[in-house]
């Protein structure tokens, strides 16, 4: 993946370099559920999230923290997570021609509620390669891949492929509405800790992948946003069944 990116960027026109400057942004948000690739990580309960990002030119460092409550304390699977999660993202966002890239490393750090599992046993990291284009002023289309190496109890080796599309509509009064949708496949191999697959359905059967999708409407007004979204997957369980999720937040950026 890295070699392919290097070759592509070497052959593609790159935007003229701009003087690098420091910047930061911050968002506080809440939601009726914490959905991660179609899986509820709060058992259908509300979630509060704080996000801050620092940038210097095309480089970025972001920190995210949220509450999490997933399953029984005796579950050594992903159900052992809680009561908090902290994420660290680092990467670059270069531009080649009309394509905006996002190349980064994502580190997920979890609190663990019992189950005989240590805190560091459940943390995992992924490599991210994303791209997006805007064929028209209001339309954005993107594709992202996430690769997770084998990480024992935390995660088997896995690959996620995801597509996104969004379209900004004309203002309605003080609101700026945006329609968006996502579809993805989160695939994970099996290992000694996840025999048969990482994802478990309502009958207790394991699966090596989950297909997830969502569609919704976001309304922006000044620094506030409100998002109304429908989620579903191809696996039936209490954490992956269809549901509507409402989220709202405030942009605290300067």
Image (cartoon, rainbow, N blue to C red):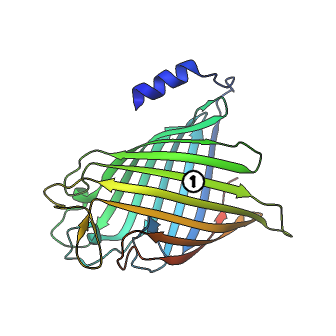
Residue pointed to by mark 1 = 164
Q: Residue at x 33, y 54 (%)?
A: 187
Which image quarter holds the N terminus? top left
Q: Is residue 142 visible?
A: yes
Q: Is residue 121 left or right of residue 220?
A: left
Looking at the rendering, which quadrant does residue 228 occupy? bottom right
Q: In this orientation, which residue lies closer to the viewer: 83 or 125?
A: 125
Looking at the rendering, which quadrant does residue 68 occupy? bottom left
Q: In this orientation, which residue lies closer to the viewer: 79 or 25?
A: 79
Q: Residue at x 27, y 59 (%)?
A: 208
Q: Is residue 161 above or below residue 245?
A: above
Q: Label 1's element?
A: strand
Q: Is residue 173 above or below residue 96?
A: below
Q: Is residue 214 above or below residue 125?
A: below
Residue 104 percent across, percent down from the top left: 46, 40
**Residue found at the very far left of the displayed protein:** 192
Residue 77 percent across, percent down from the top left: 23, 67
Looking at the rendering, which quadrant does residue 135 occupy? top right
Q: Is residue 123 left or right of residue 213?
A: left
Residue 214 percent across, percent down from the top left: 54, 66
Residue 215 percent across, percent down from the top left: 59, 66
Q: Is residue 85 left or right of residue 221?
A: left
**Residue found at the very far top of the displayed protein:** 11
**Residue found at the very far front of the displayed protein:** 234
Q: Residue at x 38, y 75 (%)?
A: 239
């Amino acid at each position: 993946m890295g070699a392919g990116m290097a070759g592509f960027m070497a052959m593609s026109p790159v935007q003229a370099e701009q003087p690098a400057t420091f910047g930061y942004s911050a968002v506080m948000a809440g939601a009726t559920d914490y959905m991660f690739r179609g899986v509820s990580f709060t058992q259908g309960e509300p979630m509060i999230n704080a996000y801050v990002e620092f940038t210097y030119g095309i480089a970025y460092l972001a920190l995210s923290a949220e509450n999490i409550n997933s399953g029984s304390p005796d579950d050594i699977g992903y159900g052992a997570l809680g009561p908090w999660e902290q994420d660290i993202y680092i990467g670059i966002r270069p531009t080649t021609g009309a394509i905006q890239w996002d190349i980064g490393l994502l580190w997920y750090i979890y609190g663990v509620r019992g189950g005989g599992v240590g805190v560091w046993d459940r943390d995992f990291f992924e490599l991210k390669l994303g791209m997006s284009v805007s064929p028209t002023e209001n339309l954005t289309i993107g594709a992202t891949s996430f690769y997770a190496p084998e990480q024992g109890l935390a995660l088997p080796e896995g690959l996620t492929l995801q597509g996104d599309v969004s379209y900004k509509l004309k203002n309605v009064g003080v609101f700026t509405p945006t329609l968006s949708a996502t579809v993805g496949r989160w695939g994970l191999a099996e290992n000694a800790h996840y025999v048969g697959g990482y994802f478990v359905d309502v009958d207790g059967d394991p699966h090596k992948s989950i297909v997830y999708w969502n569609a919704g409407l976001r309304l922006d007004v000044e620094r506030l946003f409100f998002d109304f979204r429908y989620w579903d997957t191809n696996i039936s369980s209490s954490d992956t069944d269809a549901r509507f999720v409402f989220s709202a937040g405030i942009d605290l950026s300067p």
